[in-house]
Image (cartoon, rainbow, N blue to C red):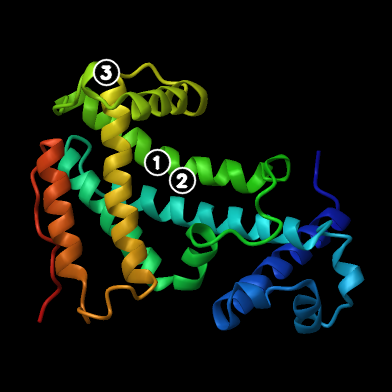
Amino acid sequence: MAESRRDRLRAATMREISETARRILVEQGPEAVTLRAIAREMGMTAPALYRYFGSHGELLRHLVGEIFTELTEELHKDIAAVPGGDMSGKFLAAARCFRHWSLAHRREYALLFGAPLPGLGHQEQMDFAEECARQFGRTFLVLFLELWQKRQFTIMTDEEIDPGLREQLRRYRDEALGVDLPLGVIQRFLQCWVLLQGSVSLEVFGHLDFALNDPEPIFELMLVDISRVLGLTYAPPRRGPA
């Protein structure tokens, strides 16, 4: 069934609202992304925006979902540029892409991974944003599972894992991931994610500025450590011509 002119106009207006919201986010920060501010930028009234988004929280969730989708597409593009069998290259490409995107989009990163904003924490209202976030997480998980299937790095047995952590890992595996994997694999996945995302967050939020004006070498050392744990071959990033 062909899309009607009314539907096209509605979709175009929603895109403009999202673009305006993101521009305000980048220029002024997440607290400035209000319906009133967006309406003022677009020459509309705030009540008119409710025909497109039912609440401020719904608009923010839509924006979160769109940004997660953009980040996921960037990851897929960089991973796809690596030859299929080069798992070391794929992992390093994904990790570096995540860092580069995050540093180039600090305000967007803060919206996705910083302190939750009011209205974003209600699970029943998180459909679009939550699905986009899962697609993002699935990108790293699929890469990790492919690595496990091909290399089978060393993991702890269930009995070796701390009992309190073991039950949390089992719940996460069975209820959230729905995969049939040893708990040690899930533990490795989370350990690597904590190192990667923690390193990126410290840099994005300026928490390494007290010591470093260029944290990239520290980030690369973190990748060396993860590569060693996962049995990967670390290769330094390519540099452009001087």
Q: Secondary structure at mark 2?
A: helix
Across and down, in percent, residue 235 comes to 9, 54
Query: What whole-number distance in Å separates the C-alpha atoms at marks 1 and 2?
Result: 5 Å
Mark 2 is surrounded, within 10 Å at the Cα level, by few (under 14), some (14 to 19) or many (20 or more) other residues, namely many
Name the disc covering residue 66, or none.
none
Q: CA distance from mark 1 to mark 3?
A: 26 Å
Q: Identify which residue is drawn at 22% across, 37% down.
A: 84
Circle 1/circle 2 CB separation < 8 Å: yes
Q: What kind of residue is marked 1?
A: Thr
Check disc 1 and report the residue beneath it: 139
The residue located at (32%, 46%) in the rendering is 193
- When the figure is inspected, residue 55 is found, relative to residue 91, above or below; the finding is below
Please name whichever residue, 226 or 169, is drawn nearer the observer in this view of the structure: 169
Q: Could you say whether the residue bearing mark 3 is in a helix, strand or loop?
A: helix
Residue 205 in view (yes/no): yes
Residue 202 quadrant = bottom left
Circle 3 is placed at which residue position? 158
**Amino acid type for the residue under numbered disc 2:** Phe
Would you call the spot at circle 1 few (<14 residues within 10 Å), some (14-19), or many (20 or more)?
Answer: some
Q: Is residue 80 visible?
A: no
Query: In whole angstroms, how far apart are the C-alphas of marks 3 and 2?
Result: 28 Å
Whether pointer 1 and pointer 3 mark residues with C-beta atoms closer than 8 Å, the reply is: no
Quadrant of res 216: bottom left
Of circles 3 and 2, the one toward us is 3
Find disc 2 in the rendering and name its residue: 136
> Which badge, 3 or 2, comes first in the chain's sequence?
2
Residue 60 spot, x, y in % from top left: 68, 61
Q: What x and y, as percent, mark residue 40?
A: 80, 83
